[in-house]
Amino acid sequence: MTRRPYGLVCPISRACEFLEPRWTIQILTELWNGSTRFNDIRKGVGNISSALLSRRLKEMEALGLVERIEDEAARTVALFRTEKSIKLEPAMNALAEWAQCNIEAEIALADMDVSILMWACGERSTSLKCRGGAP
């Protein structure tokens, strides 16, 4: 994938360049939530093709965000967070909290993929709370 950088020295802009390819943040979120298998990541991310997920994972591995470990005896592959992606998690949690508290967005049930919602509910529960006490 060829990236066209913003050409700025700003660290926030550089971080955005690093994370901006579509699905990167959603894939990292699945890894942070404990998914290690390709199919589990795909199920948790949702509307991503297998080919695109495979390409993104290879790109993320090249960037040092994902570690791919093959077990030749069991003929399986597991994907894990790296130190670099673990250090990113608090910033992403802060961004999620900010978005929940500051972005007015009504999500229509018709726009949601219920299977992804059920997968997320079954796999984990996350609670974000705004400082003002609002959910």
Image (spheres, helix red, strand yellow):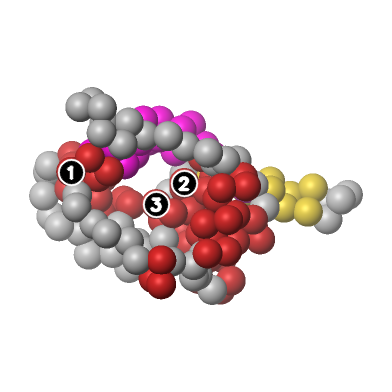
Residue 45 appears at what percent x and percent y? 51, 59
Kindly state the secondary structure of the residue where label 3 is placed.
helix
Kindly state the secondary structure of the residue where label 1 is placed.
helix
Count of numbered circles on the image: 3
Q: Is residue 96 magenta?
A: yes
Q: Is residue 54 left or right of 65 when viewed as pictured? A: right
Whole-number angstrom distance, CA of label 2 to CA of label 3? 6 Å
The magenta stretch spans which residues?
79-98
Question: Can residue 91 be seen at all in this image of the molecule?
Answer: no
Tag 2–tag 3 contact (CB < 8 Å): yes
Q: Disc 1 designates what residue?
A: 102
Q: Amino acid at mark 2?
A: Thr
Write the residue at 72% across / 52% down.
Answer: 77
Q: Is residue 11 left or right of 77 when viewed as pictured? A: left
Q: Amino acid at mark 3?
A: Ile
Q: Disc 3 designates what residue?
A: 25
**56 over 70 or under it: above or below:** below
Q: Amino acid at mark 1?
A: Asn
Write the residue at 44% across / 54% down.
Answer: 26
Whole-number angstrom distance, CA of label 2 to CA of label 1? 20 Å
**131 over 67 or under it: above or below:** above
Kindly state the secondary structure of the residue where label 2 is placed.
helix
Residue 65 appears at what percent x and percent y? 47, 44
Q: Residues within 10 Å of mark 2 (few under 14, many from 20)?
A: some
